[in-house]
Image (cartoon, rainbow, N blue to C red):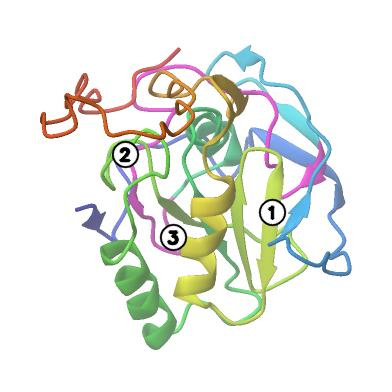
């Protein structure tokens, strides 16, 4: 369970006088592709920077790119960040790198009234475990934060992919995360660059006869770490 907090954030990334990021351009909403959710965004790398360094993202909102690697600054604590909290992409892009979902909302587009903020809290409370690593909400994500440099009222991000929304549809965002939040092919990770668990082994082909050990209990495997660590 993740905390739903809309007060002043304890994780101050920058000040209004010295922003830590800039955007070359705001992304464009693309026509939907049949069978897919959201759209691919060109990869902007995953280099680490120092706290206070300024980053210029090619596209905003960034679904990849340079980010802070420092405890308390990035990755961010998963929770709902209020409209006045400071939560720059130089922090939450690091959460994306570990496989988290980031949900952004725009006050300029009307997502900061009381009803909308309450809905964001409900979204956080209903968030599912991660699709591959099985991490519970609150370990690496979700991060829910205000962001204005985007083409719609809401944007859900995983590494290299964005779902743009004018109306927050919780289930659609959950489905987006389940489909793209952690992706593997066989035993190899596709995304994210720094997953929080090992990729699963490919499933064996089904046998024509039952295994003699079919009644044995499956191994639980290693438990995930309690929180994301800078890496």
Looking at the image, residue 144 lies above or below residue 29: above
Q: Residues within 10 Å of mark 3 (few under 14, many from 20)?
A: few
The residue lying furthest to the front in this view is 209
Question: Is residue 74 one of those drawn in magenta?
Answer: yes
Q: Residues within 10 Å of mark 1 (few under 14, many from 20)?
A: many
Q: Are marks 1 and 3 in contact (CB under 8 Å)?
A: no
Residue 18: image location, x then y, percent: 63, 35
155 vs 22: above or below: below
The label shown at residue 162 is 1
SS for tag 3? loop
Question: Which residue is located at x 83 percent, y 64 percent?
Answer: 33
Of tags 2 and 1, which is closer to the observer?
Answer: 2
Q: Earlier in the sequence, mark 1 or mark 3?
A: 3
Residue drawn at x 19%, y 32% is 214
Is residue 146 something that shows in the picture? no
Q: Is residue 163 left or right of residue 202?
A: right
Front: mark 3 or 2: 2
Distance from disc 3 to disc 2, alpha carbons, whole Å, reads: 32 Å
Please tell me which residue lies in front, 137 or 197.
197
Q: Earlier in the sequence, mark 3 or mark 2?
A: 3
Residue 179 appears at what percent x and percent y? 56, 52
> Depth check: 136 or 144 in front?
136
Say what secondary structure mark 1 lies in.
strand
Name the mark on residue 84: 3
User: Looking at the image, is 16 positioned above or below residue 37?
Assistant: above
- As drawn, the label of residue 134 is 2
Q: Does 70 appear above or below 34? A: above
């Amino acid at each position: 369970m993740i905390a739903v907090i809309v007060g002043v954030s304890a994780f101050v990334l920058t000040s209004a006088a010295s922003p830590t990021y800039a955007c070359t351009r705001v992304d464009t909403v693309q026509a939907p592709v049949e069978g897919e959710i959201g759209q691919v965004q060109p990869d902007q790398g995953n280099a680490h920077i120092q706290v206070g360094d300024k980053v210029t993202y090619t596209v905003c909102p960034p679904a990849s790119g340079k980010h802070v690697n420092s405890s308390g600054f990035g990755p961010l604590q998963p929770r709902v960040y209020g409209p006045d909290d400071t939560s720059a992409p130089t922090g939450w892009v690091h959460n994306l790198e570990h496989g988290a979902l980031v949900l952004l909302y725009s006050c300029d587009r009307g997502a900061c009234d009381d009803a909308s903020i309450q809905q964001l809290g409900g979204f956080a409370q209903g968030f599912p475990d991660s699709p591959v690593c099985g991490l519970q909400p609150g370990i690496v994500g979700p991060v829910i934060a205000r962001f204005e440099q985007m083409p719609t009222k809401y944007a859900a991000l995983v590494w290299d992919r964005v779902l743009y929304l004018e109306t927050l549809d919780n289930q659609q965002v959950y489905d987006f995360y389940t489909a793209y939040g952690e992706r593997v092919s066989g035993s190899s990770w596709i995304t994210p660059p720094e997953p929080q668990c090992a990729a699963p082994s490919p499933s064996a082909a089904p046998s024509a006869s039952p295994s003699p050990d079919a009644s044995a209990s499956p191994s639980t495997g290693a438990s995930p770490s309690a929180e994301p660590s800078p890496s």
